[in-house]
Image (tube, coloured by chain):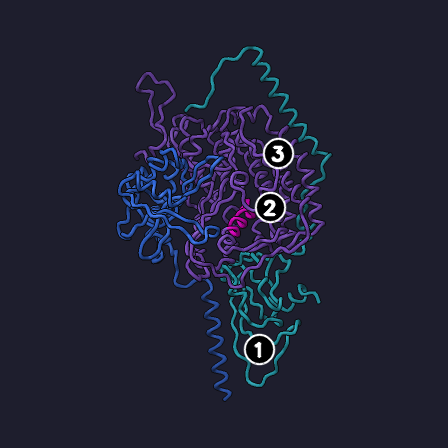
Amino acid sequence: MQTRWDVGEPHKPTINTSTEQLKSDLLTLNMGPQHPATHGVLRIEIWTDSEIVAHAIPHIGYLHRCMEKHCENLDFRGVIPFVDRLDYLASMNMEWTYAMTIEKMLGTEVPRRAELLRILTCELQRIASHLMAFGTYAIDLGAFSPFLYAFDYREKILRLFEEVSGARLLYNYIWIGGLWNDWSPEQISRVTAFCDDMEEEAKKYHELLSMNKIFIARTAHVGVMSVQDCIDFGATGPILRGAGMKWDLRKNEPYSLYSEFDFDVPVGTGEVGEPGDCWNRYIVRMREVVESIKIIRQVIEKLEPGSIMGKVPKVMKLPEGEVYFRSECPRGELAFHLVTKQDSKEPFRLKVRSPCFTHTSMLPRVAPGQMIADFVATVGSIDIVLGEIDR
Amino acid sequence: MNTQVHHTSSVKEYFGGLWDGIYSSLKGMWITFRYVWAVAPVSIEYPEVREVLPERARMRLFNDALNCISCTQCAMACPVDCIYIASEKLPEGSEIKKTSNGQAIRLHLTQFTIDTALCCYCGLCTTVCPTECLTHSHDYEFSAYTIDSMKYDYLAPDIVAWRDRIVKA
Amino acid sequence: MHKELSDLINRNVSGANAVAYLTADAKKFDSSITVETSHIYKVVEFLKTNKTTSFNSLHCISGVDYTDYMEVCYMLTNYDPSAVRNLTLKVRVTDRVNAAIDSVVGQFVSADFLEREVYDMFGIKFNNHPDMRRILCPDDWEGFPLRKDYVAQKDYNGMTVYPDNKMNMEDREFIVRQNMIKKAQAEKAQ
């Protein structure tokens, strides 16, 4: 078998073998497809030199559901349930990005209340997604209880979503032109209560895991992705911010009403470890939770009664053209490249630019020279969702 | 790109690190320990205790065939094509019935089957229904042994018993 | 912006033949630049290295099949917080049988996976790519799914993957049978 990958640096064995007899072949090890540390059906072919990874080749496609081909035969509203299933941990963000892509083409004006509620739901979803990342990352590194605490709080968000939209995970809630249902004042007050609880809870998580000496030893200086690497590979989201670059589409290219809100963009500063390592990627997520709470509080202040659905034609026909629209999702920049034909009821081509896809392609760059246990920590820290990679 | 950091540490650093490790672990364990009494249990014992579902919860679909006007809008809206609906013209001179919200039933519904195994519970079919006869019920316990038994024929006689339970008068 | 950019490309890369496509409604649609297929590597190299544009990141490669030709779209971005710039660069491929263009992996490492996906879905080969394999479909899959004239294969390694009769055929047959019985009954009654 020949090396199929020559983009990364060639690995030089780190074990000093003075005698030729001690040299041994590389061992091929399959991590996955059913490996708990790969967060889904991802297979990584690892070539190991004793316990050191010489080479890692990700094999994806186990969850390929031909979503892009399906969408070419569906009307624009019918695509939304499919878009939900891309990143099933952040469905609201997926729906919103898709809805905004179509609205941009249609030129629909979304009512202010609907926009605010969209921001509210999507920031709540971001918190839920980051809590999931936090919990599963702790499991990857051998700590079980943070997972339960994170799920407790994620459950509160899911419960709210279930009351509002009717489903716990795949909502079909954000529609083209607005929202399906309105939030009642009682539900809004529960969001406020949740924000207060969550702030306290986030502090607890820092005590529990972030500043734990063992956790730091497992993650600091591990899997370093420099800013240059991130830019070369097109990495976005917490990966890029963890490397120390202040880049957030909500700030740099504000869509929707994000320019009205006051929030910070947390970056990995390297107070523990160095910028771009697993710990900094992790801490960026945890700080984003606090920033999301800030945004949600501002949304609740600004909420006014009003309509939640804009004017959208009943039979949706789009003009001919193409749009590439991107937005900031919990895992990075999600984008839709939509091509339509004149007066067609279905997309001519819908390409999904998924953040995790590019992040997976970074694994062969980081892997060489790592211990296998550190490699597991690295895979966990980029927070992969296979539904989005394989589409 | 070897990420292992090898450096020699002084005695102070060594014991400082040791203390940090023990202290932060104890802190984490204290947080975990508090859950013994300070936090109410969050899980429920499922078969005995059942959660009350929210009003909008989308569970198994139910079609009230008496109110259906066979407009096929639900089948058109369905993204996975799991609704099979067929109808034929009423014979000449037969009495035209009305639905509960006053729409005339001009077609005779001969088939209304939903393949629940295909259904993705998106709710698009219920939003387009003009008579609101197609709704999401709150039934979520309907596992079956064969995939064929996941197909629900809403014109079958035994559905009446189900209807009495779901449709609140 | 696209007009000036295409002029800039034409001045610096000879034979690139860049044509800017400007939409009437810039609020709704995106403009793009189409360049000569054989010069894609040089154009990308110019756009990346030159100081006035400096697109330093390739975010997405998307293929579109317009039946008479295929298009490969490169979404370029530069991470400059003061002046964010995005560009859609397009290349046309007319040969459907031996579709091949130059790879840009030499400039952008991110193109590795992205080009493999375009190859998987549209069958456009990328010359000089280090690892030209299928990425989402199995290696021995036939055909390229996102082409408009694609017909799915019936069998794959002894498994029926695209049956003639889908699951709902039984129900369809049931309806037909019912209708036939009813018709027969009606005829008898007459």
User: In the image, what residue occupies the spot 47% across and 46% down?
Assistant: A335
Q: Is residue A300 magenta?
A: no
Please name the residue that numbered disc 2 is placed on: A119
- As drawn, the label of residue A304 is none
Residue B141 vs residue A224, the one in the foreground: A224
Tell me which amino acid carries mark 3. Answer: Ser
Q: Which chain gets the purple colouring?
A: A
Name which of mark 3 and mark 2 comes first in the sequence: 2
Q: Position of residue A49 (x, y in %)?
A: 38, 26
Disc 2 marks a residue whose amino acid type is Ile
Chain letter of disc 2 in the image = A
Residue lying furthest right? B37
Residue at the spot of label 1: B106
Say if residue C19 shows up in the picture: yes
For residue C80, above or below residue B120: above
Label 2 SS: helix
Chain that is cyan in the image = B
Q: Amino acid at mark 1?
A: Arg
Q: CA distance from mark 1 to mark 2?
A: 45 Å
| Mark-to-mark CA distance, 1 and 3 | 61 Å
State the hue of chain C: blue
Q: Is residue B25 left or right of residue A359?
A: right
Quarter containing the N terminus of chain A: top left
Please state the chain letter of the residue tagged with numbered disc 1 in the rendered image: B
Name which residue lies at 47% across and 82% down: C184
> Secondary structure of the magenta portion, mostly?
helix
Label ID, residue A145: 3
Q: Position of residue B164 (x, y in %)?
A: 67, 67
Residue sitting nearer the eye, A265 or B153: A265
In the displayed orientation, state which residue is furthest to the top.
Answer: B11
